[in-house]
Image (tube, rainbow, N blue to C red):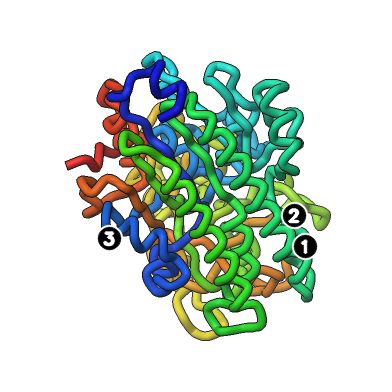
């Protein structure tokens, strides 16, 4: 028991949340020899499937996981969102998240929170004890909430993210080395502040898992060139999780969770090229690279990942689909999407979700009309620069998957039947005995 335990009092419950971005449950369950610690946590505590959100994209998932509400309430739908009343787009950052974050609730209750490397948290909050923003932060200096944190992380050679450009090389050796170095430094930083023992909530995310999956998952799935290196990376990660678990006292609950699953990528599907070929989308001229370049004959367009919007009168600046024809036009688009088949003859769309069935809140005015959950192997892209074909191949061989995210916890009383991302925030608050008003899309998993 550390000094801060004695000052706080022995009976105060604490929570450590470790995010492992994009790690699928099947990967862990199929390799207990690699994931010895997670397997043991499942056997002595709780473990199982966690349903992701629509769409299963990290920029939307982490705001929902850390607020307990859907993108209609967070205001963040993906890596790229559309300005209200405009065709201009932007990359959502932490300041665009409209809902209350978990750690702010903890702080408001008079408890302390340390938050490190959570995606979509830039700029870092200075309201909480300490924060280092994660994915989408431009550099370490601007990602840290104070000078002491910045100097400490710099001493660990802390990296905000893996250098994903290295994954584009045919020889993945340098990419793998960079991923390990990023993972090692993240663990060192986490261990340092965990040992500091001055927090009630520690919330840290390993995002290098997502990067490794994007560029090596196909090797793993097909016993390819880097299959052994893929599993070695995860063996190291599991070891770090075990070290952290062993360092915690009995009054601290460890939760390990991913925000979405992963599967092998076979084809990139250029959704706007499909819309253009099918007569739904056209451009004002041949030199086009953004949504602002569509012309007044466009009836639909797409934003990543798999979000489809009708160019609706009264909502879009130059909408051409009358509101009276909205449902009929949307059904026509659904039918066209359902008819899309890949080079192997498989149907691309596993499931098509209507916007009102997934999104609800004060910020659902920029919600998509449809979200496509693709069949495994089809990664939905939405660039506007134009492609020669709807189906192309790129340097990545792994893609996000709606199903198959996971949650493991040292508390054996968690009920993971039908658990989803929205349940994480109310569960953590329940474990911390922090009261919150009933405004979540999920509920506590504590039995």
> Residue 193 placed where, x, y %?
56, 33
What is the distance, in whole Å, between disc 1 and disc 3 at their CAs? 38 Å
What is the distance, in whole Å, between disc 1 and disc 2 at their CAs? 6 Å
Q: Toward which corner of the image does residue 224 lie, by quadrant? A: bottom right
Residue at far right of view:
287
> Residue 436 placed where, x, y %?
29, 22
Q: Residue at x 48, y 28 (%)?
A: 197
Residue at far left of view:
447
> Residue 356 placed where, x, y %?
35, 43
The residue that disc 2 covers is 163
Q: Is residue 155 left or right of residue 265?
A: right
**Figure check: 295 above or below 147:** below
Q: Secondary structure at mark 1?
A: helix
Tell me if mark 3 has few (under 14), some (14-19) or many (20+) residues whose alpha carbon lies within 10 angstroms of its own. Answer: few
- Quarter of the image with the C terminus is top left
The residue that disc 3 covers is 43
The numbered mark, 2 or 3, whose residue comes first in the sequence reads: 3
Q: Nearer the viewer, mark 2 or mark 3?
A: 3
The residue nearer to you, when weighing 318 against 83, is 83
């Amino acid at each position: 028991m550390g000094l801060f335990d004695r000052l706080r009092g022995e009976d105060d419950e604490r929570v450590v949340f470790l995010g492992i971005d994009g790690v699928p449950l099947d990967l862990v369950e199929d390799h207990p020899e690699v994931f010895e610690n997670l397997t043991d946590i499942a056997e002595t505590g709780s473990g199982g499937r966690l349903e992701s959100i629509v769409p299963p994209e990290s920029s939307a998932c982490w705001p929902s996981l850390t607020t307990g509400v859907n993108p209609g309430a967070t205001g963040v739908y993906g890596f790229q969102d559309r300005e209200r009343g405009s065709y201009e787009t932007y990359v959502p950052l932490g300041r665009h998240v409209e809902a209350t974050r978990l750690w702010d609730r903890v702080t408001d209750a008079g408890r302390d929170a340390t938050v490190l490397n959570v995606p979509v948290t830039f700029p870092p909050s200075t309201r909480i004890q300490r924060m280092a923003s994660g994915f989408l932060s431009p550099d370490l200096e601007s990602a840290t909430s104070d000078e002491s944190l910045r100097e400490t992380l710099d001493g660990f050679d802390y990296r905000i993210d893996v250098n994903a450009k290295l994954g584009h090389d045919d020889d993945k050796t340098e990419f793998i080395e960079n991923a390990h170095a990023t993972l090692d430094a993240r663990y060192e930083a986490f261990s340092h502040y965990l040992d500091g023992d001055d927090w009630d909530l520690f919330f840290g995310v390993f995002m290098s898992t997502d990067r490794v999956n994007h560029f090596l998952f196909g090797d793993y799935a097909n016993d390819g060139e880097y299959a052994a290196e893929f599993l070695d990376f995860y063996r190291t990660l599991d070891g770090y999780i075990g070290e952290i678990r062993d360092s915690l006292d009995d009054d601290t609950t460890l939760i390990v969770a991913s925000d979405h699953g992963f599967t092998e990528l076979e084809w990139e599907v250029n959704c706007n090229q499909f819309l253009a070929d099918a007569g739904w989308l056209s451009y004002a001229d041949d030199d086009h690279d953004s949504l602002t370049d569509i012309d007044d004959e466009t009836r639909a367009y797409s934003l990543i990942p798999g979000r489809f919007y009708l160019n609706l009168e009264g909502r879009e600046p130059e909408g051409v689909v009358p509101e009276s024809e909205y449902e009929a036009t949307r059904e026509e688009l659904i039918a066209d999407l359902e008819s899309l088949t890949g080079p192997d003859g498989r149907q691309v769309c596993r499931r098509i979700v209507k916007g009102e069935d997934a999104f609800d809140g004060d910020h659902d005015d920029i919600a998509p009309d449809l979200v496509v959950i693709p069949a495994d192997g089809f990664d939905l892209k939405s660039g506007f620069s134009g492609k020669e074909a709807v189906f192309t191949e790129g340097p990545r061989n792994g893609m996000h998957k709606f199903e198959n995210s996971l949650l493991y916890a040292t508390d054996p009383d968690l009920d993971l039947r039908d658990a989803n991302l929205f349940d994480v925030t109310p569960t953590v608050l329940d474990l911390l005995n922090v009261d919150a008003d009933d405004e979540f899309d999920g509920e506590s998993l504590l039995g």
